[in-house]
Image (cartoon, rainbow, N blue to C red):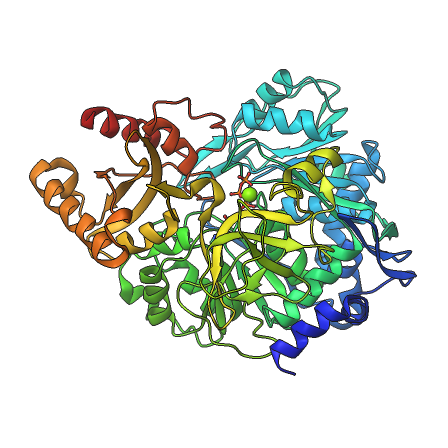
Amino acid sequence: MSYAAFYRHSIESPEAFWAEQAKLIDWQTPPRQILDDSRPPFARWFVGGTTNLCHNAVDRHLAERADQPALIAVSTETGTERTYSFRELQGQVQRVAATLVSLGVGKGDRVLIYMPMIAEAAFTMLACARLGAIHCVVFGGFASGSLASRIEDATPKVVVSADAGSRGGKVIAYKPLLDEALRLSAHKPDAVLLFDRGLAPMDLTEGRDHLAAPLLEKHRDAQVPCTWLDATDISYTIYTSGTTGRPKGVQRDVGGYAVALAASMKHIFDGHAGETYFSTSDIGWVVGHSYIVYGPLIAGMATIMYEGLPTQGLDRQPDGGIWWQLVEKYKVTVMFSAPTAVRVLKKQDPALLKKYDLSSLRALFLAGEPLDEPTARWISEGLRVPIIDNYWQTESGWPILTVANGVEPTPSRFGSPGVPMYGYKVKILNESTGEELTGPNEKGVVVIEGPTPPGFMQTVWKDDERFVNTYWKSVRGKMVYSTFDWGIRDADGYYYILGRTDDVINVAGHRLGTREIEESISGHAKVAEVAVVGVADNLKGQVAMAFVVPRDGAVLGDAQAALVLEGEVMKQVSDQLGALARPSRVHFVSVLPKTRSGKLLRRAIQAVCEGRDPGDLTTIEDPSALQQIRQSVDVSR
Ligand code: ATP
Ligand code: MG
């Protein structure tokens, strides 16, 4: 079937389409009604059906592939590798499940997981799913303040953590951060379960803190059956990256999510049972939930969980080829990463891409932020497999725009994440009038018309009102879901994301996407990374200002060289996009402010440029990056 026909079927007959997809998973009770859309914008999928995510990810595979690899935990931080078969995974998950039960956890209780990228984190997520407990994974790199606000919002009965994480060989003790967060939080959990990796000492609070090892040992042979849950029960909550402000607690269901992931593994990722999937994300992000833990396992694939930098080997020595070594070793067929990681690898010796046998690999998927053309070309020429950009959000749970390779091999286009995926009615609206833009290359806000497909967020955790008001009423009161991203669609139906709606720059009445300007600048041979923001200007309303990380660090200390490069960059933008888009200034910095998930914090840069308070910075990776921005702006004032 052509993808166009497949897509059309999903939009014209959503119930028939998704009833078919629902067969990809196991149900204890089959759904009575495929879609209940009686209370828009809340879409309820597979009503009356009962199932379980853990059953679909683990137990159901025991019949056919009990001894095949399920979870491969690799840490270049501790120099360890361990493979768990589906049978072993089931054993580990049941031990954790029994331990959680012994701490009072049952269906509907929240369990907050604050852990590094170790196998036990996945066991815990799956154990929660098994019990019908709602997990809330908080990225292990967050400090106390961010963690405390999430503990308060999620109100967990139990918090699961570890003694420490490790990054670039540096041990980061989690327990003191957790203790501080628990002190700050108004909500106190009944119990804290701690995995001790032997990396950092832990002070235990009597009566509250429990070491995992003795409890797991006590439940060594525990049999904990999967709790059958309603398809519309809550599986987990997860917070958005906080790029644009206070993170939103995204709430997801059970049945719709399981079906959406199973379908995406087949139609989008084209991954098959018995193969290996390698996603380099972190369980703290939605990609980690969908495509490290649940998606690959539901498909019967082995999944690699990787702790460490992309540039360090198992011997803990620098090695920019470690990921490719793992692809060779575990015969990875599908890989998933982010442009930010590829840009790190781009600084390594390109010969590393040729050093290993990568013939098992069929495609590399990239998501999370705009994929600039130079980065896409570099990795595509190096790997010689299709590089597939995919656009989605924490809210959607699975790709909104990409190419569905499993349905019909489709060429991707540089600069475009692709076309709407089945089930998504994607439209472009004029932000000020709310009118739909149907012509080619008309710029507007990218929206999704309801009902949203399975896997999409159910609501904002504990806050239906925020869900409706934030997402569904933002474009002229129209009942459509706003992605808050700005884009265009070309004559062939391919979409291009131009930036966040917040990031649109209005220069003398002309609306420009920051992304377009960044794309143009990043094409310059001497540019490694760039961020463009709109800065208030008395004359023009707004002007573009660029912050560039030069490929050659020398520019940073050499005012003359910087001036020359600034001129070149400005000229390049003028030549390619016109004088209006030309940045008023190009500042050179050694690092750009990013969220812990690698996204540019444009709003913070913009605030600093305009002399405003940069707002919630709990998700920033390196606060000194913002300091550099402040200095370069102050100097030029
Ligand atoms: P918050 O919603 O808290 O501000 P966030 O939007 O960064 O944070 P995520 O859900 O992690 O949180 O990121 C989704 C956003 O990332 C998208 O809305 C889009 O702006 C960007 N994005 C993701 N994938 C792509 C892609 N392939 N191309 C361009 N942008 C992308
Ligand atoms: Mg967002």
Is 317 situated left or right of 274 in this image? left
Residue 404, x across and y down, in percent: 58, 71
Q: Which quadrant contains ligand 2? A: top right
Camera-side residue of 442 and 342: 442
Q: Is residue 282 visible?
A: no
Quarter-of-image position of residue 294: bottom right
Camera-side residue of 373 and 53: 373
Quarter-of-image position of residue 545: top left
Q: Is residue 422 visible?
A: yes
Image: 170 above or below 306: above
Residue 432, x across and y down, in percent: 53, 44
Q: Quadrant of the N terminus?
A: bottom right
Q: Which residue is rendered at x = 58% and y = 34% of the image?
A: 247
Q: Which residue is rendered at x = 35% and y = 39% of the image?
A: 533
Task: Point out the residue furthest to the left here.
Answer: 560
Quarter-of-image position of residue 210: top right
Q: In this figure, what is the number of numbered marks?
A: 0
Q: Quadrant of the C terminus?
A: top left
Is 576 situated left or right of 275 in this image? left
Residue 15, x across and y down, in percent: 81, 66
Residue 519, x across and y down, in percent: 33, 55
Q: Which residue is rendered at x = 55% and y = 24% of the image?
A: 144
